[in-house]
Amino acid sequence: MSLPKIMTVYGTRPEAIKVAPVIAELQRDSRFESVAVSTGQHREMLDQVNQMFGITPKYDLGLMKPGQTLNEIVSRALTGLDEIIEREHPDVIISQGDTSTAMTAALAGFHRGVKIVHLEAGLRTGNIFSPFPEEANRRVIGQVTSLHLAPTSGSLENLRRENFRSKDIVVTGNTVIDSLLKATTWDIQFEDERLAAMADTDQRLVLVTTHRRENLDDMTEIGSAIQELAEKYPNTIFALPLHLNPLVRNAVLPKVDQLNNVIITNPLPYDQFTKLMNRASVVVTDSGGVQEEAPALGKPVLVMRENTERPEAVAAGTVKLVGTDRQRIVSETSLLLDVPAAYDAMANAVNPYGDGRAAHRSVAAIADLTGVGERVPDFAPLVEGEHKQEFAVGQPVERSRSDLVSP
Ligand code: UD1
Ligand code: UDP
């Protein structure tokens, strides 16, 4: 009898970081045949991660084209994936998260009668336009999914509220923490000379990342906020590993590229980035993955968004939503840099997103789905009524650390 064939589809940097532990686990497991497929929605930023985790996809659609529209990405991915599905006949397709690649992989598989497993299922802001188009992508993927791998009990509750069957949902933790825990064991040096020089000093470091599509109109405002902060705190280093999207770079760079205490780099390889995150005092970001990682490292995170689908670290007090208003970014960052009590209140190492065994739980659930094994216990005890609200900028949040920190 042939082994169940599991096709993992990914295409962007964060997907690669989050599927890497699952692909590794599947490849080690003799009960499965594993095929990794990249759409190549990202190029340099994806290749960095593939290289780091030693993943060589069997297929790469090479979709990355500067400035292409969402519909171009989706239509090219749909056609390309359809041909691969026809050739490979997978039993299961794993789609991770909420990108164009993830939504298209789920749809392409569904059209071909393949069972869809959604890794990182059930994240919701409740606002279909925010993040755009990711919230819509998640909901579409959910509709065609056979097995929802929810990272937290909060995401499980979101799915239950949408009437998905409890028996189709498993709480796994987020595989981003599997990768992060691995990365923290790597002994590496910064390749960038300015980062290497900074690492050995006791200079304060603020790490900034930005790329969200719905923030593109506000990128100049974000750049101005960094400029103002860098001028206000000349002894603090501001590090910006900039996304390769020209719309991000063109708006942010002119504001900051002449400032001595701003270190601008290209996207950093994952090992360098996690080291930088660990070295930072404060993280300012609109990234999803960074919102999950930085709290695990005990870093206060200011999120330049109006809402989040990751409320757990907000509830734990380590993440605060500040939006994209220049003055608000400056005042909230200044508070953390100036007031030790404010800093200490946020600098809590919390790990609501995982314990490093999310890939193991995910593969066990896939074994159950395909009839070759059994599930293992869920990531965290489920507490009814936890994390139900949408967390928005300025909205007070309940602080309930004790029941959020993983056991
Ligand atoms: C995509 C995802 C977003 C995710 C982000 C992670 C969608 C709709 N969006 O957004 O959910 O948070 O990836 O970073 O799927 N580029 C390069 N080289 C690269 C990657 C990007 O040059 O390796 C440039 C290209 O000009 C490209 C642009 O960045 O057109 C935007 O890339 P795209 O994948 O369309 O969107 P992201 O903003 O990266
Ligand atoms: N990351 C990286 N290099 C960088 C910036 C981020 O390796 O220069 C990693 C980061 O650790 C996290 C992921 O990329 O795991 C987040 O990707 P991104 O912010 O692009 O996407 P999102 O998580 O918002 O979808």
Image: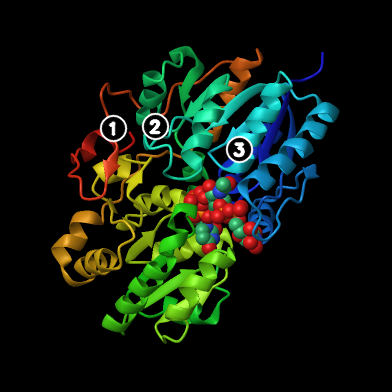
- Front-lying residue, 358 or 118: 118
Q: Are marks 3 and 1 in contact (CB under 8 Å)?
A: no
Task: Give x and y (percent) for residue 106.
Answer: 63, 30
From the image, tell me which residue sits under label 2.
152
**Residue kind at label 3, given as amino acid type:** Ala
Q: Name the residue under label 3.
A: 102
Q: Does the residue labelled 3 lie within 8 Å of ligand 1?
A: yes
Residue 394 percent across, percent down from the top left: 21, 50
Q: Which residue is denoted by mark 1 in the rendering?
A: 387
The residue sitting at 67% across, 50% down in the picture is: 41
Q: In this view, does 342 lie above or below 289?
A: below
Judged from the image, the secondary structure of the residue bearing numbered disc 3 is: helix
Q: Where is residue 206 in the image (x, y as percent from the top left)?
A: 36, 70
Tell me which amino acid carries mark 1. His
Q: Image check: 153 left or right of 314?
A: right
Is mark 2 in CB contact (under 8 Å) with mark 1?
Answer: yes
